[in-house]
Amino acid sequence: EVQLLESGGGLVQPGGSLRLSCAASGFTFSRYSLSWVRQAPGKGLEWVSGISGRRDNTYYSDSVRGRFTISSDNSKNTLYLQMNSLRAEDTAVYYCAKEGGYSYWDWGQGTLVTVSS
Amino acid sequence: QSVLTQPPSVSAAPGQKVTISCSGSSSNIGNNFVSWYQHLPGTAPKLLIYENNKRPSGIPDRFSGSKSGTSATLGITGLQTGDEADYYCGTWDSSLSAGVFGGGTKLTVL
């Protein structure tokens, strides 16, 4: 059974940093593309960032490019999202998702990030 | 503003059928597969349809998907109160090199 468990969310001041983690199990981690998707309060799903299965390509939405960095540690089966220069509009529940053919087949339960002074 | 356009809400009575539209462009829906997701508040989104019209194992055939040109449609028949949720279309945008979702459609089963 595929399991994705996000952690690292919390309250951070504007301009601050946070690193999210997503611990994966139940599948061959190094073979799948993975993404981060967020949902701000009262808003819809927003794709944030993705990393290819070979871990040689990374992708970002315009709203986070230059501030967020996606990475992974295949030895730990863990996906990361380093978030710098955080803004109030980054407040959201962040989900990690396992991809297959540009579809998100499995999702974690999410971790809440709140950017506020 | 979402790259993909969905109606904010749809509603129908139990047992009836509803369709949810998703409109995009040649850089996303027009040249890539479309997926559909069901999202209940406080839970993880669930994949309902992949590659435009295929259902993952365990998804009932009450749910169907189709695509024509730069638009896609999710159909749900035999509506149940448990189908009340937010529904999102999603795909890849080749021009943006980014994933994109619709703004979401809230389904109410009256």
Image: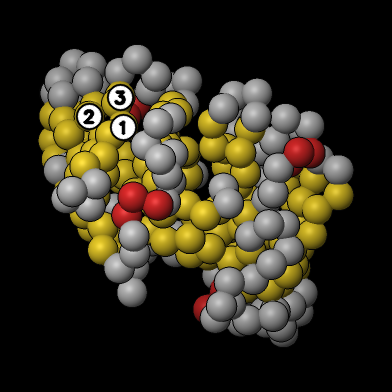
The answer to whether marks 2 and 3 sit on the same chain is yes
- Does any portion of residue B39 appear in the rendered image? no
Asked which secondary structure carries label 3, the reply is strand
- Crowd around label 2: few <14 · some 14–19 · many ≥20 (10 Å): some
Q: Are marks 2 and 3 in contact (CB under 8 Å)?
A: yes
Among the 4 quarters of the image, the one containing residue A117: top left
Q: Amino acid under label 3? A: Phe
Disc nearer the start of the sequence (2/3): 3
Amino acid on which disc 2 is placed: Gln
Compare residues B67 and B104 and report the one nearer the observer: B67
Image coords of residue B60 (percent x, y): 63, 81
| Percent of width and height locating residue B46 | 48, 64
Q: Residues within 10 Å of mark 1 (few under 14, many from 20)?
A: many
Residue A22, position in %: x, y? 24, 49
* Residue A68: assigned label: 3
Occupied quadrant, residue B29: top right
Q: Chain of mark 2?
A: A
Q: Hey, what amino acid is under mark 1?
A: Ile
Q: Is residue A99 above or below residue A61?
A: below
Q: Are marks 1 and 3 in contact (CB under 8 Å)?
A: yes
For the N terminus of chain A, which image quadrant? Answer: bottom left
Going from N to C along the chain, the mark reached first, 1 or 2, is: 1
